[in-house]
Amino acid sequence: MSTATPFAVVSHEPAIPAVMRCFSNAMTKGVLAALAVMLVSSGTSAVAGDGPYVGVGGSLSLLNSSDVTGPANAEKGYPPLDADATTNNGFAVRGMAGYAFPSGFRVEAEIDYRRHGIEQLDVKSPGGLVELTAPSVAAGVNAQAGSAIYADPRNTSYTDLHDDHKGAAAAAVPSRNSIDGDFSMLAFMANVDYDFDTGSRWVPYIGGGLGVASISVDAENAMGISLSDDSDTVLAYQVGAGIGYEFPLPEGRSITVSLDWRYFGTQDPTFKGDVSEGDFDATIRGHDVGIGVIYGF
């Protein structure tokens, strides 16, 4: 279950700084708490309009760095896989249809698609990746019947290797590897949003949703060797907030243009590596910042 893989789901190019992660975690908890209070209190005021609506949106998608992990493989002599993957800034597009209630709540179904280019893989413990990073090390390991590889606590060398290969193994870990490929996600979400009545055409909102996401990764290393070409379907979630401006139309219809932010994530998908044929997991978390347009009937 180790692997030779890359990947970073979820949505960015340099990893988001630690201070940004702290801010996003605090923001996420605040939005969830506010949403929970409103859902149980059945608020009284809302926007003037209600009824069915459809909408579209587009966003810049920023993925946090992804933790790529896989278990050791004693049979093949691989230590556990432990790496961080980063992606380039990507994009997300979505379409939605829902119903707005006079209370201010909206319920909607959403289809969301996002895509990112994979940038690099920072390897702390290579697992099956040792075959790509140092072929001579792998050859030495395979020649040693019954000998397994174990990473030391500092992830800088290996024990139980023949002396001729210890130096090469130490040089191979940690390492930074360029990756060529992309990651994509198609999600189906059920959302609940709440629009605040400001007494004007400005409409702030908060919301969140749950659903499922089909996540695909297709990546190869700098030598053109395929690392992974696989997909998995997992649970997905998101919370968000934004502010819209409502343009009234004849017959009680309207168009609302909004500036949106959302934080999304998924259950860790599991992929198969093409080199070691071992499974590995990747975390998917990120932020979207973009615009949306809603047409209310």
Image: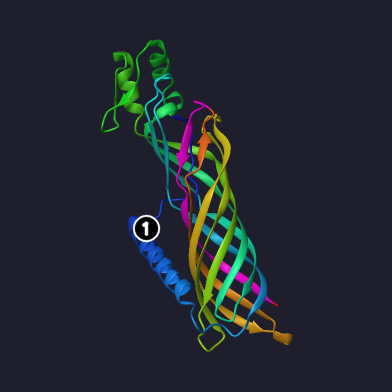
Percent position (x, y) of residue 173?
34, 30
The front one of 159 and 279 is: 279
Percent position (x, y) of residue 132?
46, 26
- Looking at this view, name the residue that lies furthest to the left: 153
Q: Is residue 168 above or below residue 251?
A: above
Percent position (x, y) of residue 123?
39, 36
Q: Quadrant of the C terminus?
A: bottom right
Q: Over which residues does the magenta segment extend?
A: 275-296
In-image side of 252 versus 48 (left or right): right
Tell me the residue at 52%/74% (across/down): 194
Tell me the residue at 52%/89% (across/down): 199
Q: Which residue is mark 1?
A: 21
Q: Quadrant of the N terminus?
A: top left
The front one of 4 and 170 is: 4
By secondary structure, the bulk of the magenta-drawn segment is best described as strand
SS for tag 1? helix
Q: Is residue 116 above or below residue 45?
A: above
Residue 7 lies in magenta, yes or no? no
Residue 284 lies in magenta, yes or no? yes
For the residue marked with disc 1, what is the amino acid? Arg
- Looking at this view, name the residue that lies furthest to the bottom: 199
Q: Is residue 208 above or below residue 233?
A: below
